[in-house]
Image (cartoon, rainbow, N blue to C red):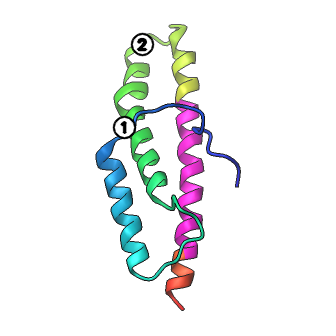
Amino acid sequence: MSVDPNKDRNDPMVPEFWLLGEDLQDKIRAAGYESPIVEGIAVDLHDLLQSAVRIQDELASAIVKLPPDDPKVVELLTELRYEFQHIGWHCQSAATYLTSAIDQLAR
């Protein structure tokens, strides 16, 4: 899998999203899954939720308030595309993690 597109960005950590991800990951491990990676699904859930909130609160709401010919629309659409690419990467990572967990736990 490619590198997380958000790797070099310094987005703030959202504690409740991180804790939910850690709790989910801990529950999967408690069920008996031995993950080959340390971060697991916690970072995927955190970044998915964080990006979704950014899309809702910042990007989409700003775009719909602007006149269609405002030059800022293209800048915000570029950021929106980035967030969707970021979400897509984490969705694929989470799906891979969950497939591995399901396969291992179903044995």
Which quarter of the image is occupied by the N terminus?
A: bottom right
Q: Is residue 74 above or below residue 7?
A: above
What SS does tag 2 mark?
A: loop
Q: Is residue 57 above or below residue 74?
A: below
Q: Is residue 20 left or right of residue 33?
A: left
The residue wearing badge 1 is 53
Q: What amino acid does circle 1 point to? A: Val
Span colored in magenta: 80-100
Q: Which mark is residue 7?
A: none
Between 39 and 78, the residue placed more toward the observer is 39
Spatial CA distance of label 2 from label 1 is 19 Å
Q: Percent from the top left, x then y, of residue 12?
A: 40, 34
- For this orientation, the residue located farthest to the left is 16
First-in-chain label (2 vs 1): 1
Q: Is residue 14 left or right of residue 63?
A: left
Task: Please tell me which residue is depicted at 36% across the width and 50% down the height of the picture.
Answer: 18
Q: Which mark is residue 66?
A: 2
The verdict on residue 89 being magenta is yes
